[in-house]
Amino acid sequence: MPLILIAVAVLALPLILAVILLACRRSTSDQHSVAYTNHLRSDAWRTTSRATIAITQGRCCLLPWRKAVHAHHLHYGNLHHERAVRDLVPVSDFGHRIAHAWIFWRGPGRLPMSAWMRCMTILVAFWVRPWVRYPVLITAGLSTWWIANLLSGMHLTPIESITHQLESLGLR
């Protein structure tokens, strides 16, 4: 149980930090060039943006429980030739605000944040695929069974373990 709390705290730390930073955010006026604005209005951008969001099946790379609605540029070096994950990542509205917080966008946290967003995009892209997710859950379930079996000292097979649990609950 303490390990679970530590894991949740570690995973929640970036989100908590981002919320604090959003509260302290410096006001910046993000004015874009006419060429960039026209690019964002083009059909090519809409196609690229939709393809980026489709990689994670519509999940945000920062907050995977939220729906991705934007393709966020990690940099503008390949403008008009963007590629998902290398240049763009899918984000939700709130995730986009986190990504544009001063420390992550104009400050020292830009490179680590970009790398983290790329990694999370890849993880979320694999996790939303059932052929990846279900074996991981089954493996986690078997690991849990093995640990519980080891601690109980009963050394039962998975079927015997389930039967034993049903009997102990009076369901068999």
Image (cartoon, rainbow, N blue to C red):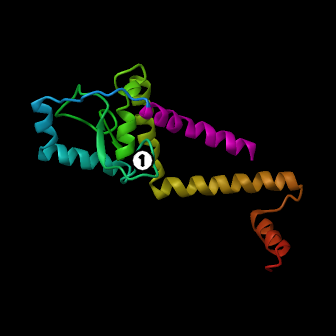
The residue located at (67%, 57%) in the rendering is 141
Residue, far top: 108
The residue located at (52%, 54%) in the rendering is 133
The residue located at (19%, 34%) in the rendering is 81
Q: Quadrant of residue 32?
A: top left
Q: Please, is residue 158 above or below residue 104 in the view?
A: below
Q: Nearer the viewer, residue 132 or 35?
A: 35
Residue 172 lies within the magenta run: no
Residue annotated with mark 1:
125
At mark 1, the secondary structure is helix
Q: Please, is residue 95 above or below residue 113 in the view?
A: below
Q: Is residue 135 left or right of residue 21?
A: right
Q: Which residues are magenta?
A: 1-23
Q: Position of residue 94 (x, y in %)?
A: 38, 44
User: Please, what is the three-letter code of the amino acid marked with disc 1?
Assistant: Ala
Q: Position of residue 28 (x, y in %)?
A: 29, 27
Magenta stretch: dominant secondary structure: helix
Residue, far bottom: 172
Q: Quadrant of residue 13?
A: top right
Q: Nearer the viewer, residue 18 or 123?
A: 18
Q: Please, is residue 155 above or below residue 165 in the view?
A: above
Q: Residues within 10 Å of mark 1 (few under 14, many from 20)?
A: many
